[in-house]
Amino acid sequence: GGLLVCALLFLAAAILGPRWGMYLEKQKIRGVDIVVALDVSRSMLARDLEPNRIARAKRELSQQLTERGAFRGANRLGLIAFAGATSLRLPLTTDHAAFRNKLNQLRVGSVPRGGTAIAKAIDAATDLFAVSPPDATKIILLVTDGEDHEGDPVEAAQQAYKEHGIRVYTVAAGDPTSTVGAQVPMNETPGALPLLHDGQIVFSKVADDELKAIAAAAQGEYV
C-alpha cells in the first residue's frame, strides 16, 4: 500500500513537470518598421513647449519608442533630420541604443539648409523602407510644427501609402491652440533674444490643419 501511494505521488509530480535552473526558449515576434522624421528647422526653438519644441520632441520620442515594453524591442527604428533638406542619421535597425544616441545628437542647424521641406522628408523616409519585407508594417512618424515652405507633403504622403503601404503619423511639435504662435529665439540659449526679420519679431504657429491633412492622406493619425 505504501509503495502504491508513493507511486501515485511520483506520478502526480511527473505530470506537474517541475523544472529548475535556466533554459533557452526561442520566440518569434513581429515588430514594426518606424522611420522618425524630425524637424530641425529654427522654428523648433520656439518655447511654447518646455524647454523648447525640439528638446521636448526628442525626450518624448526617446521615451515612447525605446523604453522596454511588450515586444517594443522588436521594432526597427530609423532616423531622418530635415529642414530645407534632409539628412539620414540612422537606417532601420533594432539597435535602440544607437537610435537614442543619434536622436540626442540632433540640434537645430544639424541640416545646413534652412526652411522646412516636409515632402522631401517623407520621400527620404520612404526610401529607407526598401529593406523592409513586403508584408511589414511601415510607419513614418513625422514630428514637426508643420510650417512647410516647398513641395506638396499631402501628395507625398498619399503616394507613400498608395505605392508602398506606408502610413504617416504626424505629431505637432508646439501648441496648436495658440492663435499667434510662439516667438522664435535666435538660438537655444536660455534668455536668447527673439529672431528678427525686417525688424519684426518672428513668430511660429503650428500648422495643425496641414498635419491633419498629411496624416489623413496616408491613413495615419494626427496628435
Image (cartoon, grey):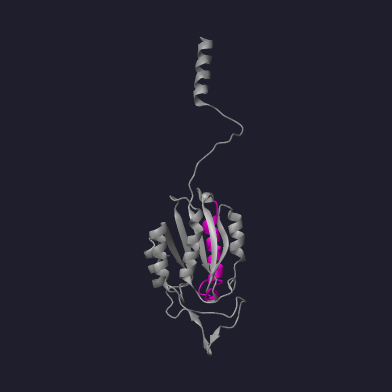
Q: Is residue 142 visible?
A: no
Principal secondary structure, stretch drawn in magenta? helix
Q: Position of residue 27 (x, y in %)?
A: 52, 40
Q: Is residue 23 above or below residue 85?
A: above
Q: Position of residue 114 (x, y in %)?
A: 54, 77
Q: Residue 214's quadrant in the figure?
A: bottom left
At horizontal 48% and vertical 47% (from top left) the residue drawn is 30
**Relative to the observer, which residue lies in front, 217 or 99?**
217
At horizontal 54% and vertical 58% (from top left) the residue drawn is 78
Q: Position of residue 48 (x, y in %)?
A: 50, 74
- Is residue 161 highlighted in magenta? no
Q: Is residue 81 visible?
A: yes
Q: Quadrant of the C terminus?
A: bottom left
- Is residue 65 highlighted in magenta? yes
Bounds of the magenta span?
Answer: 43-68
Q: How many marks?
A: 0
Q: Is residue 138 above or below residue 109?
A: above
